[in-house]
Amino acid sequence: MKLHIVLVEPEIPQNTGNISRTCAILGAKLHLVYPLGFQINEKTVQRSGLDYWDKLAIEEHDSFDKFLQKYKPEEHNMFFATTKAKHVYSDINYNRMDEVFLVFGKETKGLPEEILLKYIDKTIRIPMRETLRSLNLSNSVAIIAYEVERQNNFEKLEGISSYFD
């Protein structure tokens, strides 16, 4: 199973740095959709994932429209994360999928409403109290990405450390 993490117009470099580290550790491909709210070479982005930056697969896209033209949601297992989603992320059965795309919007606005409405059956959410704002983007990515990996028995990820052997 190949995991893709898609960040649409991320605004906070530290979040993108943390997410890049998560992607490197999981072997997931990171898709960055422009415009970004920062320069990709900023120290703050690389500081969060510096030890992992050279182990990260990154694909950059000029716009969300161009990303959607290349990776059509109708042809891929693509899930759009939003607080307004129809399904809880853990209700999806990811373990029979060759490829999974997890798409996250910018920190301040999320994903475009027209996309969420068009693909309402492919929206997922993390349960949380209604009265509070959403989780931090890097936390949300980690929660959902690790659920995908858990359902796939953490294939290709390290088991118990030899330290305890």
Image (tube, rainbow, N blue to C red):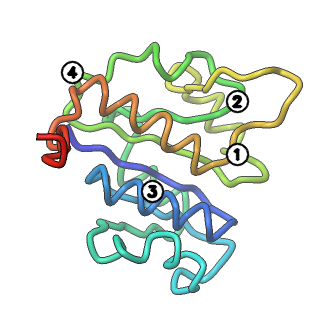
Q: Which residue is mark 1?
A: 110
Check the image and report above or below for 28 versus 131. Answer: below
Q: Quadrant of residue 111?
A: top right
Q: CA distance from mark 3 to mark 4?
A: 24 Å
For marks 2 and 1 on the same chain, the one whose residue lies earlier in the sequence: 2
Q: Quadrant of the C terminus?
A: top left
Q: CA distance from mark 2 to mark 1?
A: 9 Å
Q: CA distance from mark 4 to mark 1?
A: 28 Å
For marks 3 and 4 on the same chain, the one whose residue lies earlier in the sequence: 3
Q: Quadrant of the N terminus?
A: top left
Q: Residue at x 41, y 54 (%)?
A: 22
Given contact means CB atoms under 8 Å apart, are the residues at marks 3 and 2 in contact? no
Disc 1 residue type?
Gly
Given contact means CB atoms under 8 Å apart, are the residues at marks 3 and 4 in contact? no
Disc 4 residue type?
Arg
Check the image and report above or below for 89 versus 114. Answer: above
Residue 146: x %, y % from top left = 39, 35
Image depth: mark 3 or mark 4 in front: 4
Disc 2, SS: loop
Check the image and report above or below for 34 versus 151. Answer: below
Q: Which residue is mark 3?
A: 67
Q: Which residue is mark 2?
A: 83
Q: CA distance from mark 2 to mark 4?
A: 25 Å
Residue 8: x %, y % from top left = 58, 56
Disc 4, SS: loop
Residue 77: x %, y % from top left = 34, 32
Left/right of residue 87 with respect to residue 29 in the rendered view: right
Disc 1, SS: loop
Disc 2 residue type?
Thr
Disc 3 residue type?
Phe
